[in-house]
Amino acid sequence: MRTKTLLLSALLGALGSVSVHAQNVYSLNAVGYINVTLEPGWTILTCPLIASPDNTIGTLLNNAGGAYQSSSGKALVYAFTGGVYSGSDTAGKLSGGTGWQNGGTITLNPGEAVFFFNPNPIGTGANMTATFVGTVPTGTLTTPLIPGYNLVGSQVPVTGDLVTNSLSTLTNGAKNDFIYTYDSDAGSATTQVGYGPQNVYHPATGAWSSGDPTITNVYNGFFYYNATTTGATNNWVENYSVGGN
């Protein structure tokens, strides 16, 4: 998978040391693009940009020309909100043609993620691609992690270690929380808050038992499992301001 993210000079200066991939500077606004590679099989997809006119699948993954259809089948999108699968859409209409069967209304706002399925054969099939264009979110950015499973992504375009990154600062994990990332070739992988094989929370270190969660591309999302027994929402708070970080 490869990502090329176009960002402004201030953003590049602020984020270059914390694993944001950037090339070419064109403006003084926090506007850029992300080239997305969707390999055959499943991808947990997020969009850390505010697109125009909206962040629906129909806008971000425009299928007017049939880009998400092939001789192997049609792309699928599954949304997950409130701890449950909340909707799906299929490239192409039931009677044939292009577009999205259910109108492409599923949202992919910064912080949200969806499952995307490329129907081409794993290992031998063609990638599908997309280009996300929009404004980089700024300010205090809160992604609520409700009890149970949450399908999420960073609200800012970062890669690498989500814990030590000074923008993503995913440091509020609690006992028995899980993170699941996904790779279409290898399947799912997990890291877990804990210390040692018993996965007992260590208040002094708050260590992840399999190492800090990391993402390879700025468009990678993941499952976060909030294991609370109190029913409390765990807010993931990120902060970014142009020229301020």
Image: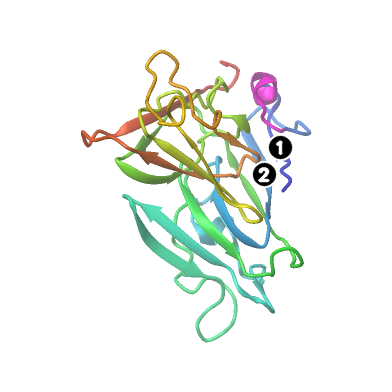
Q: Position of residue 133 (x, y in %)?
A: 63, 46
Q: Position of residue 56 (x, y in %)?
A: 49, 56
Tell me the residue that label 1 is attached to.
6
Q: Residue furthest top?
A: 204
Residue sitting at 31 percent across and 40 percent down? 146
* Depicted 28 relative to depicted 82: above or below: above
Determine if the magenta segment contains residue 8: no
Q: Position of residue 104 (x, y in %)?
A: 48, 64
Determine if the magenta segment contains residue 19: yes
Secondary element at image label 2: strand
User: The residue under label 1 is which amino acid type?
Assistant: Leu
Residue sitting at 67 percent across and 62 percent down? 40
User: Principal SS element in the magenta part?
Assistant: helix
Give the residues in magenta.
Answer: 11-21
Tell me the residue that label 2 is attached to.
34
| Quadrant of the snapshot with the C terminus | top right
